[in-house]
Image (spheres, rainbow, N blue to C red):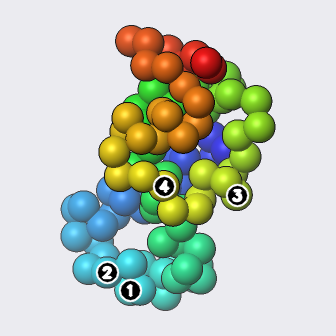
C-alpha cells in the first residue's frame, strides 16, 4: 500500500507541475491504463492521518488497497466515519 501511495503522489505531482495536461495524456505517456491511474490518483485524497498510518505500516485491520482505490467520500470526516476511525491528532485509532 505504501508503494501505491508513493506512486499516486508522484503522479499527482506530475500533473501539478504540468508535465502532463490530463490523466489520459499521463496514462499514455507512462504506459498505464487510464482507469487504473484515475483510481490510483484517488489515494491522494485520503485523510492525512490515514496516509501517515499506511506509510508507517499501521493501517487499521481490514484496510486493503482495492478498497482504498474505490470512490471515497470527499469529506475527511466522512472518510474517518466510513472507516470507523476517530480523529486523534497525530494518529489513527479504530473505534
Q: Which residue is mark 1?
A: 25
Whole-Å distance between the Cαs marked 4 and 1? 24 Å
**Is 61 left or right of 85, judged from the image as shown?**
right
Whole-Å distance between the Cαs marked 4 and 3? 12 Å
The quarter of the picture where the C terminus appears is top right
Whole-Å distance between the Cαs marked 1 and 3? 24 Å
Badge 1 density bin: few <14, some 14–19, many ≥20, Cα 10 Å? some
| Quadrant of the rendered image containing residue 24 | bottom left
Can residue 91 be seen in this snapshot?
yes
Determine the residue positioned at 39% across, 78% down. Answer: 23
x and y, in percent, of residue 22 in the image: 31, 81
| Quadrant of the rendered image containing residue 59 | top right
Q: Name the secondary structure under disc 3.
A: helix
Q: Which residue is mark 2?
A: 22
Q: Nearer the viewer, mark 4 or mark 3?
A: 4
Q: Which residue is mark 4?
A: 72
Badge 3 density bin: few <14, some 14–19, many ≥20, Cα 10 Å? few
Callouts 2 and 1 close, C-beta under 8 Å: yes
Amino acid at each position: 500500500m505504501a508503494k501505491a501511495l508513493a506512486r499516486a503522489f508522484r503522479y499527482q505531482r506530475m500533473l501539478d507541475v504540468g508535465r502532463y495536461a490530463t490523466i489520459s495524456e499521463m496514462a499514455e505517456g507512462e504506459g498505464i491504463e487510464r482507469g487504473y491511474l484515475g483510481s490510483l490518483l484517488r489515494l491522494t485524497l485520503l485523510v492525512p492521518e490515514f496516509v501517515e498510518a499506511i506509510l508507517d505500516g499501521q493501517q487499521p485491520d481490514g484496510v486493503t488497497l482495492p478498497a482504498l482505490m474505490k470512490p471515497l467520500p470527499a469529506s475527511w470526516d466522512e472518510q474517518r466515519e466510513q472507516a470507523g476511525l476517530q480523529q486523534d491528532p497525530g494518529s489513527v485509532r479504530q473505534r
